Amino acid sequence: MTAAVTSGIAAPLGFKAAGVSARIKASGAPDLALIVSDSPATASAVFTTNRAQAAPVLVSKEHLDRSQGQARAIVVNSGCANACTGDEGVAAARAMATETARLLACPVDQVLVASTGVIGVALPLDRIRAGLPGAVTALAADQGAAAARAIMTTDPFPKEAAARVTIAGRDVVVGGMAKGSGMIEPMMATMLAFLTTDAMVPKTLLDRALREAVHDTFNAITVDGECSTNDSVMLLANGASGATVDDESYGAFVEALRSVCLDLALGIVRGGEGATKLVTVTVTGAASPDEARRAAKAIANSPLVKTAIHGGDPNWGRLIAVAGRAGVSFELSRAGVRIGETVLFEEGRPHDENAPRAARYLAGKEIAVSVDLGAGSATSTVWTCDLSAEYVRINADYRT
Amino acid sequence: MTAAVTSGIAAPLGFKAAGVSARIKASGAPDLALIVSDSPATASAVFTTNRAQAAPVLVSKEHLDRSQGQARAIVVNSGCANACTGDEGVAAARAMATETARLLACPVDQVLVASTGVIGVALPLDRIRAGLPGAVTALAADQGAAAARAIMTTDPFPKEAAARVTIAGRDVVVGGMAKGSGMIEPMMATMLAFLTTDAMVPKTLLDRALREAVHDTFNAITVDGECSTNDSVMLLANGASGATVDDESYGAFVEALRSVCLDLALGIVRGGEGATKLVTVTVTGAASPDEARRAAKAIANSPLVKTAIHGGDPNWGRLIAVAGRAGVSFELSRAGVRIGETVLFEEGRPHDENAPRAARYLAGKEIAVSVDLGAGSATSTVWTCDLSAEYVRINADYRT
């Protein structure tokens, strides 16, 4: 049903993108991205649950309310998060939308805004104003990759994805791009992810599809357990394919949307700050799906687990120790641990003789660990990366 | 009231200690400690809340129950945690107590046991049996320092403390020793800490005093947010001073006990794995003491806060971002951040112009940060250390 297509955010019909430098970043790297739909699109978004919400989050919520879920464009800058910037920050986010709307000749409340970068520094509005005309000029259907580059901060590579699905006999494309790569444990959304589709999707179905797709993708990853002030996932559906998603085709559409979200989410983890390995954490035997997720997140955020995996050390006792402190039902005498396919602990008894085999497996780049809580039958999978000295280096002097 | 005295766990009258090598550690470093009271002491203890409790925790609880809170001795090994070792592990912990009781000619349920080291490896009982006679021979009032060394794992230095207080006209001494230094966020107790006093303290008062002293000391520290399977704090009161603690003198006794616990707890943080700085995190303006503690712990465990402090980066936005995601009441427009005495954020507005001053302060070794949640009047203080590349190095190859 879902086939890979090449491009990212501008892959669906009727979308254009651009990525340029507005000199917000001292390096001169691209830092201003624009996503534009040819016609007003139905828009859905989920935002950070952090109580210190950044100005662009507040303004985008306001615009979605006022436009009743209609949007023409998303404007994004990197290099400055415009968070903890007081009333001036909100005014700056509004001005960024206003200038974009003026250039595109659309209502201001059909422009959504997003920012990422350092917290607490004023948005350099003059530079954004000066850079926007160039971004509008650069808009094209083949500029998705440039847009994906312009939203990067410490990301080691851009994250793009797309999927094709047949709905009502027509080709529908879902495209997307995202950025990481630190302060990542989305609690409602992720850092910044943008999704487009040329399907026509009624607003209530679009909202439901986005929530469902995000739950097992962006909300199931963690790099460092930190939930940002700016996390946003925005989805635009412009109907340019001529296909409409209804209750019957909803399942196929969600599957395509989820596959794009998972591609992007795993890209964020692979590109996590200092990451050298992608780690899949599966918890089984939990008393409830919620407890399974909670235990899996606790394991995925454990610095002792993450450093052991970084070092290729099959220190399975740390997995049990985290499961035991995760605040969920746990029965040591029925618990188990696997690293890859290797059993290290089963029914409460160690199999340390298997440690050398697990150590050889841990030398790889894609690692799976699973913990059986011995307390029920619910399961959950989350994804994380290892914790390296490079993470410390990146974050010890992020601003300097 | 509380005066410093020199020695540690054997500082109070009527206690002896020893620390020897039983060759549990491959390095040959000391790994077997013994604490003995000349007469049966009243005993109190708090243990880990981790659901994967280690064998020595189970056995010590059982002995405290059976002896109705009487103990003559505590036997401790490092180099092996005897955790996740199944029924064999429990039998080994019992045997360690039995052999100690035989050598000291006391009831087995008057011996408490503790272990620390790698999880999931069988306790080398033969080596412990072979080492115990030497430990008994070495027992002396001046061997507290040797005992403190014998309980170390990755600790960079031993932790000892003592305090003197006058009760009913008599000198009473409280002594203690502790070990860290990873897997530290005690949720009811700490890693391993042992306390002695020559006061006579009725069991109910002793239990209350230990709980109160632990709450603001061992339970207010974190190195890496990990709660161990073996955390134990044990306190023996033998009455050798001739002074009895009653309701009137309780306050003075708790003060002395708390000062010893705080010394040891701060020692654990200063000696945290890879630590280069001691960080005091104070949260004010919280809706309740519980929320204040929760926010302070979230900040103290944030890898982004800890790496910024490690790098001397006054990235105060990270403190706000953590406070905002901590799941507590938080009002951004009334919130504030100080690094040392320098205001970086106040009433929801940034003072980034003060960042250079804060950066100079962060070059020091003892750092205080405070966050005002703007949501009430409750406060809490916790202590942590910075997160360095050395933490990663230590934990990436702990077993290899």
Image (tube, coloured by chain):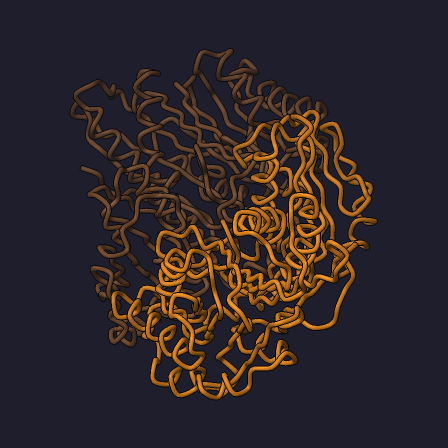
Chain colours: A brown, B orange
Residue B125 shown left or right of residue A353 in the figure: right
Residue B71 on image: x %, y %: 47, 65
Tally the numbered discs: 0
Residue B238 on image: x %, y %: 58, 64
Residue A170 on image: x %, y %: 20, 26
Q: Is residue A318 above or below residue A298?
A: below
Residue B263 shown left or right of residue A277 in the figure: right
Q: Quadrant of the N terminus of chain B?
A: bottom right
Front residue of A215 and B385: B385
What residue is at 51 percent from the left and 11 percent from the top?
A: A66
Q: Quadrant of the C terminus of chain B?
A: bottom left
Residue B343 shown left or right of residue B230 in the figure: right
Classify residue B176 by image quadrant: bottom right
Front residue of A130 and B50: B50
Is residue A153 at all visible to an observer of this figure? Answer: no
Q: Is residue A183 above or below residue A400?
A: above
What residue is at 48 percent from the left and 46 percent from the top?
A: A225
What residue is at 34 percent from the left and 47 percent from the top?
A: A382
Is residue B349 at all visible to an observer of this figure? Answer: yes
Q: Is residue B226 above or below residue A203?
A: below
Classify residue A19 by image quadrant: top right
Residue A162 shown left or right of residue A116 in the figure: left
Outermost residue, front direction?
B242
What residue is at 71 percent from the left and 42 percent from the top?
A: B370
Front residue of B351 and B97: B97
Residue A109 on image: x %, y %: 54, 15
Front residue of B121 and B215: B215
